[in-house]
Image (tube, rainbow, N blue to C red):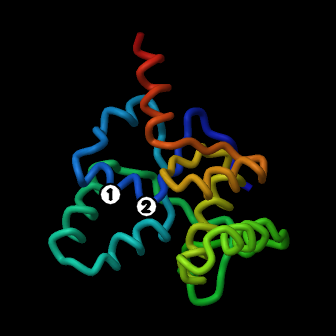
Amino acid sequence: MCQPPLNGLMLDTNVFNRVADGLLSLSAFDGYTIFATHVQLDELRNTAKNDRRVALLACFREINALHIPTESMVWDVSAWDECKWTSDDLCERIFAEIRKVERPSKSDDNCWRDALIADTAIKCFHALITDDGNLRKIVKRNHGSAMSISELLSVAKSAHV
């Protein structure tokens, strides 16, 4: 497992979208160490519209997240050189919970990607920042830390008062 860093945030892919849309300033991350896995970068790279993909990848570079491997691996989803093999079943349990609440709106691959991000955030002691309410609840039920973008902004605002 990873060692718990101080102030570590794992950003879900939807956070990069909010930055690209101008709805979230990079200053929201001041004082935090930001982390991402290949999963978020893969999702951004797979954006269908070229202009949007370019903007999202620019946000990813600007945020300058520390790139870490996923703490588990999933066949046909994980990048082999950017994941770890694990003997626990946390990622599988998270996937099952996501599948249960998201059926049929999300594909299995999308559920696995969310599970890998959540699993990594939990095992590495990073707070997952996501506007996916179901994913936040699942992370918290599995003893992780998660908050919405508005909760992050509230915390950042109170820290600067």
Where is 64 relative to 79, above or below? above
**160, above or below 8, in the image:** above
Instruction: Count residues near mark 1 (Cα–Cα under 10 Å), then give few for <14, some for 14-19, many for 20+.
Output: some
- Front residue of 116/80: it is 116
* Residue occupying image coordinates x 73% and y 67%: 97
Q: Is residue 138 above or below residue 24?
A: below
Residue beneath the point at 70% across and 56% down: 138
Q: Which residue is mark 1?
A: 17
Labels 1 and 2 touching (C-beta < 8 A): yes
* Residue 132 - label: none
Crowding at label 2, few (<14), some or many (≥20) Cα neighbours within 10 Å? many
Image coordinates of residue 122 in percent, x first then y, are 69, 52
Q: Amino acid at mark 1?
A: Asn
Identify whether 54 is placed above or below 62: below
- The kind of secondary structure element at disc 2 is helix
Mark 2, residue position? 13
Give whichever of 97, 51 is nearer the camera.
97
Quadrant assignment for the N terminus: bottom right
Report x, y in % for residue 85.
73, 75
- Quadrant where the C terminus sits is top left
| Residue at screen point 33% across, 75% down | 45
Residue 141 horizontal/vertical position (percent): 77, 51
**In the image, is 99 to the left or to the right of 12?**
right
Q: Amino acid at mark 2?
A: Thr
Of residues 87 and 93, the one drawn nearer to the viewer in this rendering: 93
Toward the top, the furthest residue is 161
Furthest-bottom residue in this view? 76
Say which element carries label 1: helix
